[in-house]
Image: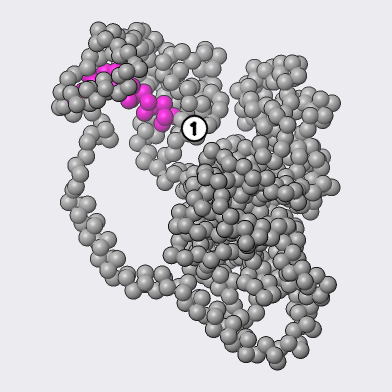
Amino acid sequence: MRLTLRTMLAYLDDVLDPADAQELGARISESEFASELVHRVRSSARKMRLSAPELEEQGVGAELNSVADYLDNVLPEEQLSDFEQVCLESDVHLAEVTCCHQILTLVLGEPAVVSDGVRQRVYRVDSEHREWRKPSQQETVSDSKGSVVQPPPVVMGTEASQSEVPDFMKPTRSIRLWHLGVVGVVAVAMLLAFPAVRSQLGWLDDADQEVAQQNEDAGAGSGAAASTESGGAASANDGAAVPPVVASAADSVVDAGSEAEPETANSSDTSSSVPAEPPPVATTAQPLGKLVSPNQLLLRWNPEAQVFEPVAVNVALNTGDHLLVPPGFRAQIALASGLQMTVVGHATWQWVATKGAGPRLVLSHGRFVFSRKGESAEPVAVSCAGRSSWLALPKQDSQVAVELWRYLPPGKDPRVAVGEIALRVYQWAGGCWAEEQSALTVEKPSGVVCSRALGQQALEQMVVETSPGWILSAKQAGSFDEIATVALAEAISSDEPLILQLQTLQASHRLHEVRALTARSLAALGEYDAILESFHNKAYRASWEKHFGLLRQLVARHPDTAVGVQMAFERQRGDDGEQLFRLIWGYDSDQLEAESAGQLVQWLSDEAIDIRVLAFSNLKRLTGKTQLFFPEKPIGQQSTAIRGWARLLEEGSIVPAQDPTPWNQRSEWLNP
């Protein structure tokens, strides 16, 4: 009997014949690699915080059906080695195969216990439209050796022996003594912490009273200050510093601010486009909200030090703040207006002061979800994509989600072409988004209403079936993404420069997920060396798609950013830096038809792993296919996959799957 992963699983689950089991056990004991693999198989199945593969993964070993085909012994012979290689390299996929094999062994090896009540309920389900099989009919299944076996009989009754059932499948008692102890401790803690909780709940009310008092004090001295306001405004704003990332990535901030005050367009006061440094907090600070989610990174620009700094939980956010959330995080901010703003992934925004009105929320880039958290919520003035708009949530369950990004068609040189801002707004359960405040009361159609526009086009409104998946948190407790965000947020402090801390973590942290997340965070702050180095490091293969997508978005946001990425490529890779930077742009149909499609296929055989990674990323996005190509593997092991891509090239199939538009891009490409 051959020693393979499937036969090893059959040996560990004790489903082999005694003679075969004895022979296989001897082979395992003689092989150091096999013995180590047995240990990995057992330990991976017991890891409590190990995540599961993504539902939409593609390729052998990652696709849903490949595990079933492998265990059923129907996976094509040419794919067996690739499947087992994926399992050997990933504890996540190895644990999936191991647990599925254990469950099938238990189900097929023990009688199924079905209570009389459950059996009768099943018979009644849709009985008028379904013809149930007779009890004498049997189905056959294949065991791990490929032989045909009959499924075990069904045992009537409600009780069964639990002696051979794994602990995690046994029923647990509803209440245990330690449960009561935990409840008691939590109750005492809540009782002791009640004054602190009460003070936190009243934070926003106190802030409103403070703002009102400050406005009254400012009104008393407005007559004396009027003579000096016009002369001092320009000089104050001349010294205001704008964060380079925000300024280079979102010139919509300037447009939005200027539209907010059309009557002062000819004035020398430029506070609407470039906010001045906030005045002393003791006299004119306007607390607008605070970060309420722990283990999330929210960064604020410090104009004096010219750096971004982390914002601690419950610290006030004020007018004039330039804020940024790095990729991968999901920061929740409680606003003084009674709303909660959830920032999903990489995003930049600020609050801009306006004359004669409250501060305006200027969204520059990213995804934002607005929901109600207070008894009442005031409308909020919002600017994005050069548009002045209003946001209102009249009901407790009303929500509005805003998504905006720079769209640059594939193949355009980002050093000379500037992408247009694509805006998409989702409204449901009474949530309102309108360009005029008076239009907030206009009744919306039932369902999820989507408004979208590119550049300065008129908003196009439509009703969609469901809201996008990014509105709800995609991270599962204990997943790699959740572990990485928590670990990175906990490691960042305000004692040292942020960039220095991120560079140290990226170079030395023991978890790959944290190093990859740190590399993306550095790229969002204008430091590209770490993310470019990841493309020729096999340890980052699980993060290459996210890194490629983030770079594609960054270079589309401003020519200065594109030049910075190009210089980083050339600094690291010399003469190859130019073609690596070219691979970030993408390709249109004319470029592919000319020669770029053949060049992409040729680059799959390049000796440099980073060139293979970026070429494959382009081909995968264009066609939606992989041809079982793995850029991290040696070229000698990729001959079959490369021939598959060469065949697609000869057939003329390496073309965009559909005409590129801002609206048909996949969600994970817009905000990696």
Q: Is residue 357 visible?
A: yes
Colour mapping used in the image: one colour
- Quadrant that contains the N terminus: top left
Residue 316 sits above or below residue 22 on the image: below
Residues packed near mark 1 inside 10 Å, few (<14), some (14 to 19) or many (20 plus):
few
What type of secondary structure mainly makes up the magenta span?
Answer: helix
Image position of 353 (left or right of 11): right
Looking at the rendering, the stretch of residues picked out in magenta corresponds to 94-115
Name which quarter of the figure residue 259 lies in. bottom right
Residue 48 percent across, percent down from the top left: 36, 41
Residue 164 percent across, percent down from the top left: 21, 26
Q: Amino acid at mark 1?
A: Leu
Residue 488 sits above or below residue 625 on the image: below
Find numbered disc 1 in the image and state the secondary structure of the residue it sits on.
loop
- Give the residue number, with chain letter if any, for mark 1: 55
Q: Is residue 574 visible?
A: no
- The residue located at (64%, 27%) in the rendering is 624
- The residue located at (54%, 17%) in the rendering is 79
Residue 486 sits above or below residue 124 on the image: below
- Quadrant that contains the C terminus: top right
Q: Is residue 210 magenta?
A: no
* Nearer to us in this view, 209 or 429: 429
- The residue located at (24%, 11%) in the rendering is 135
Residue 97 percent across, percent down from the top left: 41, 26
Residue 82 percent across, percent down from the top left: 54, 21
Q: Is residue 101 magenta?
A: yes
Residue 436 sits above or below residue 668 on the image: below
Name which quarter of the figure residue 532 lies in. top right
* Nearer to us in this view, 249 or 516: 249
Image position of 239 (left or right of 145): right
- The residue located at (33%, 25%) in the rendering is 102
